[in-house]
Structures are given as C-alpha cells and as structure tokens.
Image: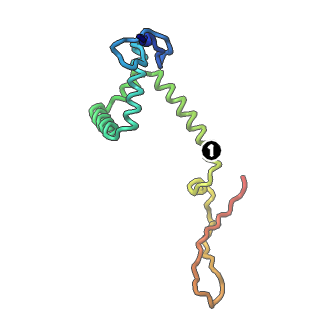
Amino acid sequence: MEVRVEQVTFRCTCCRRILRRNSRVKNQRYCGTRACQQARKNKWQREKQQADPDYRSNKRESQQAWQKGNLTYWRQYRSRNLEYLERNRQLQQERDRKRCQTTDRLAKMDTLSRYFNDTTATYYIYAGGENLAKKDALLVKIIPITPG
C-alpha cells in the first residue's frame, strides 16, 4: 500500500519565503501577509484588464464618474502634499530641458518659421516643351537659410 504524502510547504511567489501550506487553499502561491495579498490582487487585475474588454470598459466608466464627482481632487492633493508638488516641478523642468535640446535638431515646418523672411519665394517647376501630354507643375518653396 502506497501512501502519498502531500507537500506541506510552498514558496511565496511575492516574498519568496518558504511557508507552511494552508490545507484549505488549493494551489497556494501567496502567503497571507498584506503586501503579498496586494501583489496577488494587482496581478489578477492586470491579467483581467488585458483579457476582458468589459472589465476595461467598466473600470474606465467608473473612473470617469469618480473624476466628475471629485473635480478639485488634484488641486487639494497638491496643496496638502508640497513635497510632491516640488518634485513634480523639478521633473517637469528636466523634461522641458530635454525637449528643448532635441527640438533644435528636428526638421519640422513650425521650427523653420524663424527662417521665413522677404527672400522666401514660391515657384512652379514643370517640364518645358510644347508637345508634352502632361504639364503637371511642382510647387516649390525656396527658403534661404543663413548659418548662425
């Protein structure tokens, strides 16, 4: 007669401690500490949100309803948490500084506006000759750029 001995311990997925298994919890992977139970709940919510479109929709609607009922929440939060406010200011200044450094190297039309002046001209370029079937013109704007 063979007696099967069930494993009495398990390793918690969150805190990695080896603990005694609760016989009432089938396939126990998390211990009962508050931090580990919160990690288990967060994992479940992440997986549920990725897999279930109804869950995502309900969560979004719930958040929007809460925001409508608490319009001054962030203003009050910032006034009560001055260290958060200061940290956020410093991080925003850093983001602004980085954005300014990269903007000068981008070739965007709105960044070229400082170069537009009286000498900017628009020309139509098309193939010469009278016997051509198509005379599509190409609109070209010539912008003289001076270094400096």
The spot of residue 70 in percent (x, y) is: 29, 31
* Position of 69 relative to 24 (above/below): below
**Outermost residue to the right:** 147
The spot of residue 94 in percent (x, y) is: 58, 33
Residue where numbered disc 1 is placed: 102
Q: Nearer the viewer, residue 109 or 68?
A: 68
The spot of residue 53 in percent (x, y) is: 34, 41
Residue 9, image quadrant: top left
Residue 31, image quadrant: top left
Please report the residue visible at 61 percent of the width from the left and 74 percent of the height from the top.
Answer: 123
Q: Secondary structure at mark 1?
A: helix
Coloring applied to the structure: rainbow
* Position of 141 relative to 56 (above/below): below
The spot of residue 116 in percent (x, y) is: 61, 61
Please report the residue visible at 39 percent of the width from the left and 14 percent of the height from the top.
Answer: 34
**145 relative position to 86: left or right:** right
Please report the residue visible at 49 percent of the width from the left and 11 percent of the height from the top.
Answer: 18
